[in-house]
Amino acid sequence: MHQLPNLLSIFRVLLGFSTFYTLRNGFFNTTLYIVIVAILTDFLDGYLARKYDVTSTFGKVIDPLADKICFVCLFSGLYLIGSIPLSVVVLFVMRDVIMVLGWLTSYVKDKAGTPNNLGPLMIGKINTTIQFLYISFVLINRTFNIADSFIEQTFLFGTLFLTITSTVPYIIRYAKLLKR
């Protein structure tokens, strides 16, 4: 049980890479199912780690890294098949780069060598959920051809807004860290 949350996160990394392949090859329904499994493993790994008190430094690294790999693969694949604009991919990837650089900064600055003092913020968790929902909606549209541009645009703008607003608290947090 101790390693199960980490194994689920590692599995999510593999799922992320597989989504890029399935998108590029037109297997939209398969990609949708993979995303559903990724969402479930994202929830389950954190739940199990907290419930059984088996959190680890590795888990604190691999879990958010798995999310970032999933999103980069998904957003890049969706762009390459023409489902989302490049500007959206750039914004999402820039946010993830900021997050990784901030985490690395906290790791280097922390005297104990572990970034335990900079866990995820609730707005970041909400943002991850909304991004997964947006991607799911895009994939449902591609899979079942039920495109509703108004709903998709609403999801897109909501996701963009939350991505930007959820990045600001992290930037502030990392800027404070650099000053100490």
Image (tube, rainbow, N blue to C red):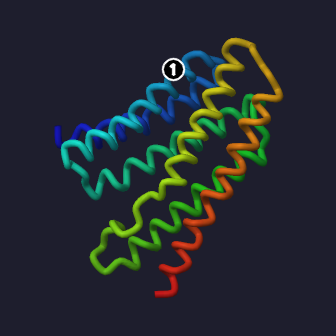
Across and down, in percent, residue 66 comes to 44, 44
157 displayed left or right of 48: right
Give the SS element for disc 1: helix
**Residue at 82 percent of width and 26 percent of height:** 149
**Residue at 26 percent of width and 39 percent of height:** 48
Extreme-top residue of the structure: 144
Q: Which image quarter holds the N terminus?
A: top left
Q: Number of numbered discs present?
A: 1
Across and down, in percent, residue 29 comes to 59, 16
2 displayed left or right of 105: left
Q: Residues within 10 Å of mark 1 (few under 14, many from 20)?
A: some
In terms of depth relative to the viewer, which is nearer, 150 or 7?
150
Across and down, in percent, residue 135 comes to 63, 32
**Residue at 34 percent of width and 43 percent of height:** 46
The image shows residue 15, relative to residue 114, as above or below, that is: above
Q: Please state which amino acid type lies under the numbered disc 1.
A: Tyr
The image shows residue 50, relative to residue 103, as above or below, that is: above
The image shows residue 80, relative to residue 180, as above or below, that is: above
In terms of depth relative to the viewer, which is nearer, 6 or 126?
126
**Residue at 66 percent of width and 18 percent of height:** 26
The image quarter in which residue 168 lies: bottom right
In terms of depth relative to the viewer, which is nearer, 119 or 80?
119
Extreme-right residue of the structure: 150
Residue wearing tag 1: 33
94 displayed left or right of 44: right
The image shows residue 81, relative to residue 164, as above or below, that is: above
In terms of depth relative to the viewer, which is nearer, 26 or 51?
51
56 displayed left or right of 100: left
The image quarter in which residue 24 lies: top right
